[in-house]
Amino acid sequence: MPSGSLEGRVAVVTGVSRRAGIGFAVAAELLAAGASVLVHSWSPHDADQPWGLDPAGDAGVVEQLGGEGHRLRHVAADFADPQAPAKVVTAAVEAFGAVDVVVANHARSSNHGLAEVTAAELDLTWAVNARASVLLAQAFAAVHDDERPGGRIILFTSGQHLAPMSQELPYAISKGAIHQMTLTLSDALADRGITVNALNPGPVDTGWADPDLAERVGRALPAGRWCRPDEVARLVRWLASDESRWITGQVVNAEGGFRRWVM
């Protein structure tokens, strides 16, 4: 098998609702590496955010990945529903007969500081970001055939362990939970040959930042620009491949030397 190949593997990638997003780039990278991929989306979340829906809609996003067929399927699901993670994993098994890799890329954004945050927003953001990640891992573990090589779970955190995010309190707390769950989930699955790692990609240009923020953060990055989604996707592909088999329980900071102190 070529280096980094995922030929014959089956992956679930969550949060694939925008062509500018990380999830789209990850799905494209895994498809190019030979995997069959079930992509998940929940576009109503994007509709409530400043960046809005992808103009192409879910159908257009999937079509640009090559369209549904023998190696690509799509399912929409709201991870506020505790049954949704298992339904997504089950859909992949029904489509492809197995699941080898879960990339939990989805996230609910939440711009709430301490003064305005509510219990409802804390609960919802935690449910979508953290709880759903655990339930995806649980559902994957329940169906994974350990005779198949390359069991992988890849989570996403957000640098909240490196600097405060006081205006995004629910988001930072939920991503902090993902950071902390990584080692424990990895231990729960290590004896089965399934690895669990998390990725902090730093500032990624997915079209969400306003021009002022984009410029300020760009000055704090040695390359003078934000990370591109395809750069994150290549690291995810490596973590999903046999080349990373000896790495588990790690939170990987891939921030391009982000100098937060000069912002």
Image (cartoon, rainbow, N blue to C red):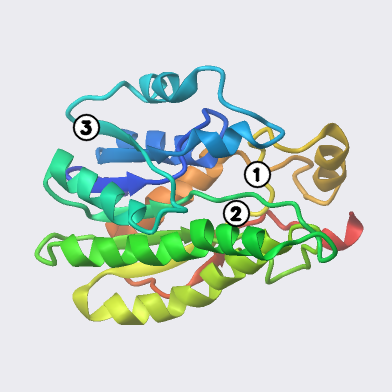
If the image is split into quadrants, where does the C terminus sit?
Answer: bottom right
**Circle 1: residue type:** Val
User: Residue at (43%, 25%) from the top-left corner?
Assistant: 58
Label count reads 3
Gap in Å between the C-alphas at discs 2 and 1?
Answer: 7 Å
Indicate which disc residue 201 carries. 2
Instruction: Please determine whether, in this image, residue 64 is positioned above or below residue 188.
Output: above
Q: Position of residue 178 (x, y in %)?
A: 52, 68
**Circle 3: residue type:** Arg
| Disc 2 and disc 1 in contact, CB within 8 angstroms | yes
| Classed neighbour count for the residue bearing mark 2: other residues with Cα under 10 Å, few (<14), some (14–19), many (≥20) | many
Instruction: Please determine whether, in this image, residue 227 is positioned above or below residue 160.
Output: above
**Circle 2: residue type:** Pro
Q: Position of residue 107 (x, y in %)?
A: 55, 51
- Residue bearing the label numbered 3: 71
In the rendered structure, the answer to whether residue 86 lies left or right of residue 163 reads left
